[in-house]
Image (tube, rainbow, N blue to C red):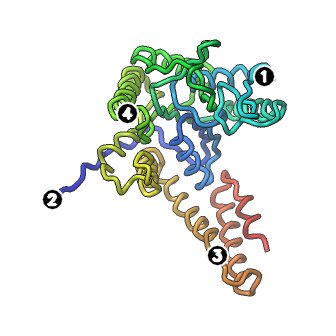
Amino acid sequence: MKFRTEIQIDKYKYPIEHHNSIATIGSCFAENIAEYLRRFRFNTLANPFGILYNPVSIFNALSMIHSVKEFSKKDLVSQDDLWHSWFHHGSFSHPNAEQCVLKINDQIKRAKSFMEICDYLIITYGTAFVFEHIDSGIIVSNCHKIPSSQFRRYRLSVGEIESNISKTIELVKSLYPSIKIIFSVSPIRHLKDGMVDNQLSKSSLILALHNTIKDDESCFYFPSYEIMMDDLRDYRFYESNLTHPNQMAIDYILNKFSETWFSEKCLSTIRDIEKLNQARAHKSLFPGSDKDKEFKYMQLEHIEKYKIKYPHIDFSDDLKYFKI
């Protein structure tokens, strides 16, 4: 007897290897994916504009990375003793305008350099709802707690979403012809929109994605939202706010991603690295003791073997961690 509907996903014909460079951009789930990739020592760039939710903001960010847009103080707005960018997450905000601009421009330059070696771009959309700043006409990435009266909130039509997805693909492929783009819709529900509007939003994103990428062999869809809603349809897989997947659910979805996208060689490498991660999680009862030093020596020996076995992976941080 079956008690759940597990989603079966075919393995993709372009498997990810450890020597590949991977960029993620988009919602909180893009952060989850990047954290997972970093855990297993992939060369990863995560959300160079901070968390972004809608297709317009994600396209704008990629356009600015391509043009290496240089921000200045005139591109910022001030609110609550902080300087903000309409195009960035609040993690870029700062009490000092110059420091805010410095961080923004540094990340854009780093992102531009990374994209030039990038093999895979993972884009996760969170919502079809946008906030348009009335005075400037800008669809903002974050309202930064500025009064709602200054914005017009509306849901993008399926056609508008398709247009932004198409522009995103065209931009990325024109610059990096061999890159593969993996799209997904965030499994996080936006219940502030209301149950009906959240479903309309997610459905619009999913429909637009499938309409746009169905005939493009360089673009792919990973069903994060569907796994959460149809496979893990139980509140034990949610945080206490009942909207965000808990760690167990995130791990399950990312394991599905691994099974789908990683080669067998890559999965074997991950199993070795996980042993190293478990060793790093070990807490010695008596730091500096002979037993503790013996444990560290053992890990350093393992790392030296991994360096030979996996010359394309950077283990410098692990060597530093276990340094005696």
Q: Amino acid at mark 3?
A: Lys
- Left or right, 144 with reference to 317: left
* Mark identifier at residue 194: 4
Where does label 1 land, which residue?
70
Indicate which disc, 3 or 2, sits on the residue closer to the N terminus: 2
Residue contact at pointers 1 and 3, CB within 8 angstroms: no
Q: Secondary structure at mark 3?
A: loop
**Which image quarter is the C terminus in?**
bottom right
Residue receiving disc 2: 1
128 displayed left or right of 137: left
Sequence-first tag of 4 and 3 = 4
Left or right: where 292 falls relative to 41:
right
Q: Is residue 119 left or right of residue 321?
A: left
The residues bearing labels 4 and 1 have C-alpha atoms spaced at a distance of 38 Å
The kind of secondary structure element at disc 2 is loop
Identified by mark 4, the residue type is Gly
Query: Would you say residue 110 is visible in this rendering?
Result: no
In front of the other: 85 or 29: 85
Give the label, 4 or 1, closer to the camera.
4
* Residue 12 location, quadrant: top left
Q: Earlier in the sequence, mark 1 or mark 2?
A: 2
Viewer-proximal residue, 25 or 265? Answer: 25
Q: Which sits in the foreground, 99 or 36?
A: 99
Residue 63 locus on image (x, y percent):
64, 20
Cα distance between the residues tagged 3 and 2: 43 Å
Q: What distance separates the C-alpha of mark 4 from that of mark 3?
A: 44 Å
**In the image, what residue occupies the spot 28% across and 49% down?**
6
Residue 270 visible: yes
The residue carrying pointer 2 sits among few (fewer than 14), some (14 to 19) or many (20 or more) residues within 10 Å by Cα, namely: few
Say which residue appears at 79% left-offset and 30% top-offset.
101
Pair 4/2: label in front = 4
